[in-house]
Image: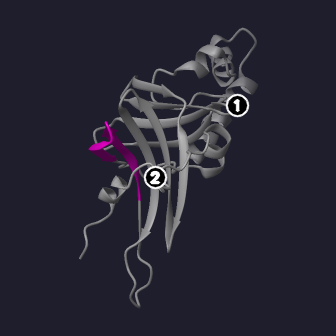
């Protein structure tokens, strides 16, 4: 994902350098790379616009995408959809926990009584001589009125796992309640089945 973003930036810079004055294609490429209120407010596709900071991004088996984008310090957006965003939520909170042999980061966004929890997790699946055998998964857990509704696991070789440093910049830490460190434990459903 980072390589792709850098490649797109390089193309925009090259087009800008090689375009002739008055060349509308070159002017459009340079203008697209410059953040504007319209470009950062809500892009057509669920992705981060130029000038925004990607915190998380992935694609699902059905082609839908999710992105969490830092839009300004202390402000993030959750975006989900296909060719266009079907759901855009502002705000969110973050939570992290370390495991023996791994850890998990979660970003939660509320929409009424429905909560969308974006997660990146790595858990140990082996304890024998063959080693740790980590299982890594990313996706979204959807809960309604505190009850599990669904899980969507990323099917993307270019997934951008939760960037903890970016999350700290754009999302406030969750307040621990009921001794829970994370928003949900339902992310365990993404782990491989036990042998």
What residue is shown with label 1? 14
Residue farthest toward the top in the current orientation of the protein: 22
Q: In the rendered view, would you say 97 is above or below 125?
A: above
Position of residue 3 measured from the top left corner of the image (x, y, whole percent): 59, 47
The alpha-carbon separation of the residues under discs 1 and 2 comes to 54 Å
Position of residue 130 measured from the top left corner of the image (x, y, whole percent): 40, 87
Q: Nearer the viewer, mark 1 or mark 2?
A: 2
Q: Residue at x 32, y 45 (%)?
A: 152
Q: Is residue 176 left or right of residue 85?
A: right
The secondary structure that most of the magenta stretch takes on is strand
Q: Residue at x 59, y 49 (%)?
A: 163
Position of residue 156 measured from the top left corner of the image (x, y, whole percent): 40, 49
What residue is shown with label 2? 178
* Quarter of the image where one finds residue 127: bottom left
**Mark 1 crowdedness (10 Å alpha carbons): few <14, some 14-19, many ≥20:** some
Which image quadrant: the C terminus? bottom left
Position of residue 100 measured from the top left corner of the image (x, y, whole percent): 50, 74
């Amino acid at each position: 994902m980072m390589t792709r973003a850098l490649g797109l930036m390089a193309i925009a810079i090259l087009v800008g350098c090689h375009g002739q004055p008055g060349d509308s294609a070159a002017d459009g490429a340079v203008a697209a790379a410059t953040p504007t209120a319209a470009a950062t407010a809500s892009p057509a596709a669920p992705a981060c616009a130029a000038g925004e900071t990607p915190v998380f991004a992935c694609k699902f088996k059905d082609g839908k995408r999710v992105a969490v984008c830092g839009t300004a310090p202390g402000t993030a957006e959750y975006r989900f959809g296909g060719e266009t965003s079907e759901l855009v939520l502002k705000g969110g909170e973050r939570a992290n926990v370390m495991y023996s042999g791994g850890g998990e980061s979660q970003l939660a966004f509320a929409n009424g009584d429905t909560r969308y929890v974006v997660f990146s997790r790595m858990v140990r699946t082996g304890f024998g001589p063959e080693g740790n055998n980590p299982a890594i998964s990313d996706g979204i857990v959807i809960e309604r009125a505190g009850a599990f509704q669904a899980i969507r696991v990323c099917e993307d070789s270019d997934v951008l796992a939760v960037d903890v440093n970016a999350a700290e910049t754009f999302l406030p830490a969750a307040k621990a309640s009921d001794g829970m460190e994370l928003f949900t434990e339902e992310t365990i459903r993404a782990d491989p089945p036990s042998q």
